[in-house]
Image (spheres, helix red, strand yellow):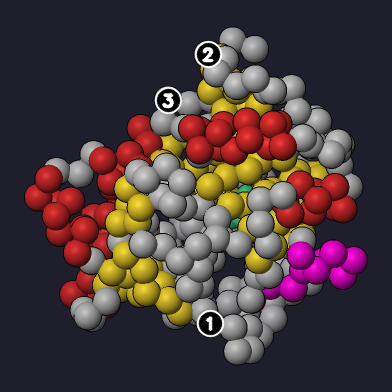
Amino acid sequence: MNAPRNTQYRHLEAHKIAGSMGAEITGIDLSQDLSEEQLADIRAALLDNLVICFRDQVITPDQQLAFARRWGDIHLHPFMKGMESHPEILAIIKRPGDKKNFGGAWHTDQMFSPSPAMGTILYAKEVPSAGGDTLFANLYLAYESLSDGMKKIANQLRTVCVGDNFRQADGRTRVDRSTSQSGDMQVKDPGEVQTTSIHPLVRTHPETGRKALYVGGHVQRFDGMTEEESLPLLNFFMDHAIRPEFTGRIRWQNNTLTFWDNRCTQHFAINDYPAETRIMHRITVCGDKPF
Ligand code: SIN
């Protein structure tokens, strides 16, 4: 591998995959029970690189769950049904003929929850021969590159984040825009679970202390403003946050597992494989209330 190596870890190697973020990790077998030292290195690699991927991991749903549980409690998706055998795992499935894909808009996971997901652990079961990549954007860089004047404005704003109202959704509900015609992915009623929340636009990462511009497709408006009033500035922040130099991508292979930090990144699943199947197993780990 020609990518620059980062040799500061004792139990793994991290090979950077883009200038802004992202690394491929070698030296870890996720089918094994990892030691505390290995876990500490994975945590450091995640905090340093924001998105880390592990290739050629042959793991079962139970092994993926065991790895995820080392990071915290598992978050259940309020709108999507998990796998029958493993309700904590969401099978993301797109088959030939399905027009839409799940996650095909810039967002950060569970931003609409009072305590959004800390991280997402996505495992590739079956990927198309080409395409189906996931894009990521570094929200630290998005904040740090703002002018002092704009930082001052951003620091004061709070966002209203809505689970069933992606800003790009044209008023269609989750059921209307259900991605799967084959019925492989089923939408559910969230019941009493809270799916609208207000968060600071600039959040401080609880582990690194760095500030991130916490925007994504779930943001409907700024707190205390109408949608119309919010939109021009919101559009600026959304466009700014995905400038190409802040982004990177994961090119999936079967058995790639990617772990990303939702507290400082956004992601976007590319829908560019109309005639092929893509099957992923997703687990989200509970996080803290943003501050
Ligand atoms: C997601 O938004 O969690 C799905 C990402 C993907 O399938 O690449």
| Callout 1 secondary element | loop
Q: Which residue position holds label 2?
A: 4
Image quarter where the N terminus lies is top right
Disc 1 residue type (three-letter): Gln
Q: Position of residue 242 (x, y in %)?
A: 37, 45
> As drawn, is 90 to the left or to the right of 5?
right
> As drawn, is 266 to the left or to the right of 153?
right
Residues rendered magenta in the picture: 79-88
N-terminal of the pair, mark 2 or mark 1, is 2
Frontmost of labels 1 and 3 is: 1
Q: Which mark is residue 194?
A: 1
Residue closest to the far bottom: 192
Disc 2 residue type (three-letter): Pro
Rendered view: 77 above or below 137: below
N-terminal of the pair, mark 1 or mark 3, is 3
Q: Position of residue 74 (x, y in %)?
A: 69, 62
Residue under the image location 49 percent in, 43 percent down:
136
Quarter of image, res 44: top right
Check contact, mark 2 vs mark 1: CB within 8 A.
Answer: no
Image quarter where the C terminus lies is bottom left
The secondary structure making up most of the magenta span is loop
Residue under the image location 68 percent in, 62 percent down:
73
Instruction: For ligand 1, tell me if the residue under mark 1 lies within 8 Å.
Output: no
* Residue sitting nearer the eye, 83 or 275: 83
Q: Is residue 23 magenta?
A: no
Q: Is residue 81 magenta?
A: yes
* Residue sitting nearer the eye, 191 or 232: 191
